[in-house]
Image (cartoon, rainbow, N blue to C red):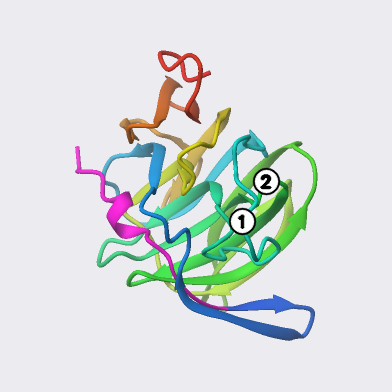
């Protein structure tokens, strides 16, 4: 079993161009969620190689207890008090990763997002404001066409955006990331699977492991499902 590296690997230095139509708004540099609190609740698979896809089905679970903050409609703004439901594929060298998830901030602003962390620097590739707390399947994958490797981010069978990169990963994770000590949230992940080059089918998280900080919880239900949460009333089953 490999040691969990996520809390060190994924502090986000926000130097991003937010794509709004054909125009861009530069945000940063700053550190997203610059308060000292930064905790995770994760289910992850042990060391593998050539990971090129991950998927999960879950609700966009809106937390309670998020303070109002400022810059509320700017994704990853450091003063927006963010909480993220995410999935990650980690690279084998340096703190680099590909990410896809749902952001909640300022007690009422929600959005889907996708991006990459390159040697610790966070690059937001795409976002879309959303409303409600519906259930969706989040599918992040890399394919190769004409010798070009491209990562795609897909919600419910609709490709939302893509990014040209040859990266593949050695570890994959799904779960909750919070910058708000008083946030309350719990939800269930199902249909959790990953894919590697050379495979002909999806693979369950056969060597499932969990990571949880002091305010967080994880209850592993099976190789493809788990409850995750923060400040829950029943920590034993994370609900």
Q: Does the magenta stretch include residue 207?
A: no
Residue 147 visible within the image: no
Name the residue at 45% across, 73% down.
30
Please name the residue shown 58% across and 28% down the image: 187
The magenta stretch spans residue 11: yes
List x then y, in percent, for residue 64: 63, 34
* In this picture, residue 141 sits left or right of residue 208: right
Mark 2, secondary structure of its residue: loop
Taking depth in this image into account, of 45 and 186 the one nearest to the observer is 186
At mark 1, the secondary structure is loop
From the viewer's perspective, is 40 left or right of 1? right
Left or right side of 46 for 150: right
Residue 76 found in image quarter: bottom right
The residue shown at (65%, 35%) is 61
Along the polypeptide, which appears first: circle 1 or circle 2? 1
The dot on residue 191 is none
- Quick one: 217 or 181, which is closer to the camera? 181
x, y (%) of residue 185? 57, 31
* Relative to 169, 194 lies left or right: right
**Residue 223, picture quadrant:** top left
Circle 2 residue: 107
Percent from the top left, x then y, of residue 191? 57, 31
- Contact, CB < 8 Å: mark 1 with mark 2? yes
Q: Nearer the viewer, residue 62 or 170?
A: 62
The Cα atoms of the two marked residues, 1 and 2, are separated by: 8 Å
Residue 225 image point, x, y percent: 50, 26
Determine crowd level at label 2: few under 14, some 14-19, many 20+ residues with C-alpha closer than 10 A.
Answer: many
Q: From which residue to which does the magenta span run?
A: 1-16
Tell me the tag on residue 69.
1
Camera sees residue 219: yes
At horizontal 77% and vertical 85% (from top left) the residue drawn is 22
């Amino acid at each position: 079993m490999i040691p969990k590296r996520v809390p060190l690997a994924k502090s986000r230095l926000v130097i991003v161009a937010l794509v709004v139509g054909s125009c861009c708004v530069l945000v940063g540099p700053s550190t997203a969620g610059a308060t000292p609190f930064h905790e995770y609740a994760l289910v992850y698979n042990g060391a593998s190689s050539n990971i090129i896809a991950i998927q999960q089905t879950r609700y966009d679970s809106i937390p309670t207890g998020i303070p109002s903050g400022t810059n509320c409609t700017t994704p990853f703004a450091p003063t927006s008090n963010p909480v993220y439901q995410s999935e990650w594929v980690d690279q084998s060298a340096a703190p680099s990763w590909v990410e896809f998830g749902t952001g909640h901030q300022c007690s009422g602003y929600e959005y889907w997002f996708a991006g990459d962390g390159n040697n610790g620097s966070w690059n937001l590739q795409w976002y879309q404001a959303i409303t409600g707390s519906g259930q969706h399947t989040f599918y992040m994958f890399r394919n190769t066409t004409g010798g070009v490797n491209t990562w795609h981010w897909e919600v419910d069978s609709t490709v939302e955006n893509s990014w040209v990169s040859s990266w593949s990963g050695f570890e994959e994770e799904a779960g909750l990331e919070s910058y708000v000590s008083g946030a309350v949230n719990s939800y269930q992940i199902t249909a959790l699977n990953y894919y590697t080059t050379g495979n002909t089918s999806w693979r369950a998280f056969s060597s499932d492991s969990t990571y949880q900080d002091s305010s967080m919880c994880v209850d592993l239900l099976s190789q493809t499902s788990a409850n995750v949460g923060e400040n829950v009333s029943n920590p034993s089953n994370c609900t």
